[in-house]
Amino acid sequence: MRLESLKERKERLKELGEFILSKRDRIQAAVHQDLKKSFIEVDLSEIYPIVNEIRHTLEHLDEWTKPKKIDAPITYLGTRSEIKFEPKGVCLIIAPWNYPFSLCFGPLVSCLAAGNTAIIKPSEMTPATSQLIAELTNEFFEEDIVKVFEGDQQVSTELLQLPFDHIFFTGSPAVGKIIMRAAAENLTSVTLELGGKSPTIIDETALISTAAKRIAFGKFLNNGQTCIAPDYILVHERVKDDFIASLKKQVVEMFGEAGKLNEDSMSYSRIVSQKHFKRLNQMVENAISDGAKVEFSGPVNENTLFIHPVLLSNVSLQSKLMEEEIFGPVLPIVTYRSEEEVIDLINSRQKPLALYVFSERSSFQKKVLSSTSAGTACINECVIQFTHANLPFGGVNNSGIGKSHGHAGFLEFSNQKSVLKQLTRFSSMSMMYPPFRPRLKWMIDMMLKYF
Ligand code: NAD
């Protein structure tokens, strides 16, 4: 493994930021080709998060890499200890398709900041971006620092045979299990950034139009193909109608042209593939045949992979729509009457990656936070926690293992080596050495009692 000075790492990261900005138009074009994301959305969700991650890292890397002094307990008098942050080594980064550029380069920034080298496997589902990532990586990095292997699960499977020092995977919980099993063969540490269903609660005190606006943005950004998008709404029955009316209005204002959302909208992405297009339409049809009511919908077009936002109420909790991660522009709305009902429903399911509460009552906000578990949570907001540089990001159990971004990302890619240095010729520990005499027993009795 190649060991680099802190200065070299910082220079590389700074140059990487400049390099990415110089390729902005090519990144916009590639992601647009794969997902029809508008150029502004590419700037916002693919380029800015990386540039921001690099800036934040450069600002703090001196402090993060400095060995951390550790106090000695009284029984360790005469020693000095510290934690050193050493690179783990050669890391594997496997990325999904929904933010195909930023989910490769985001973890890469933390990986390089911690002094590692990397192999990246982008998603095969977004081929234009995958090809661009390979090309840009070849141009910018020496081969023994970062190398890209393009391809599908076959390529991942082959890479997973290798004894990496860390694997950073972003993708579905189902594939996360495969990654963890493969990592176990080499006892390789893993970060698993997974997905699942993120519930969004709206109680009777919520500011409805503000909640609707924030949810419309968070849910329909990238056509709902966002791991932390509100997956389903739990709304108090007293404000359900208000909320639905407000959400419809916000969707049209954000994505519609001339009061109507159509295929010409420049702010609305497309579904990634026919497979997902069919899966989503099937989910909606099944929910409707199980009794769901369509509150809002519009054109769908298989050729252009366009699906108008769909709002459904009266959705059965047993329908696929309420059991599987939706990952598309379909939003089921479930009503509730009591706080306990909401908390029980969330606790009866896998722990979510994100949990959102819209409420003006702090007692309710606190109650939800303290009686449920989730990787991340927002009160009166959604989705924006992802790009907060000082907030660790990640799931819990089914929604993920480990944390990323900023300092948390640096730690994830570092081995925290505990180092103890004996400073004196006489070690207090030598009093514990055998042969074990009665005097030692007295000392141990004292230790058990007082230290
Ligand atoms: P996926 O799990 O199908 O694929 C992710 C990556 O794993 C791809 O590169 C793919 O080629 C590879 N892969 C697929 N099958 C594999 C196998 N059997 N063995 C080894 N590798 C395999 O996920 P996706 O469809 O690309 O992305 C959507 C999922 O990712 C959603 O569940 C979403 O919530 C999640 N996600 C999570 C985050 C996060 O930060 N937590 C971010 C984005 C997406």
Image: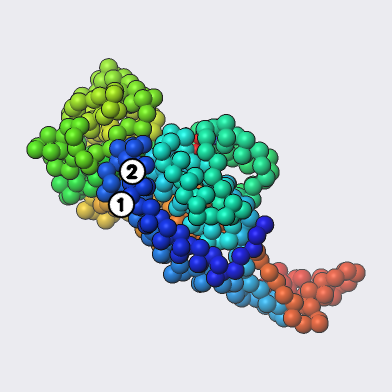
Q: Quadrant of the C terminus?
A: bottom right
Question: Which is in the foreground here, disc 1 or disc 2?
Answer: 2
Relative to 302, is 84 above or below?
A: below
Is residue 443 shown left or right of residue 94? right
Name the residue tied to disc 2.
29
Residue 306 image position (x, y, % from top left): 26, 29
Residue 311 visible to an observer of this rendering: no
Mark 1 to mark 2: distance in Å?
14 Å
Mark 1, Cα crowd under 10 Å, few <14 / some 14-19 / many 20+, is few
Residue 431 image position (x, y, % from top left): 82, 75
Farthest front residue in view: 139
Residue drawn at x 68%, y 40% as measured from the top left: 185
Q: Nearer the viewer, residue 401 or 48?
A: 48
Disc 1 residue type (three-letter)? Leu
How many numbered markers are drawn? 2
Relative to 70, is 145 above or below?
A: above
Q: Earlier in the sequence, mark 1 or mark 2?
A: 2
Q: Nearer the viewer, residue 232 or 260?
A: 260
Is residue 376 shown left or right of residue 361? right
Tell me the element at label 2: helix
Residue drawn at x 46%, y 63% as measured from the top left: 15
Name the residue tied to disc 1.
44
Disc 2 residue type (three-letter)? Ala
Q: Nearer the viewer, residue 251 or 24?
A: 24
Residue 272 visible to an observer of this rendering: yes
Q: Quadrant of residue 293?
A: top left
Tell me the element at label 1: helix
Residue 3 image position (x, y, % from top left): 64, 63
Relative to 369, is 418 above or below?
A: below
Q: Quadrant of the N terminus?
A: bottom right
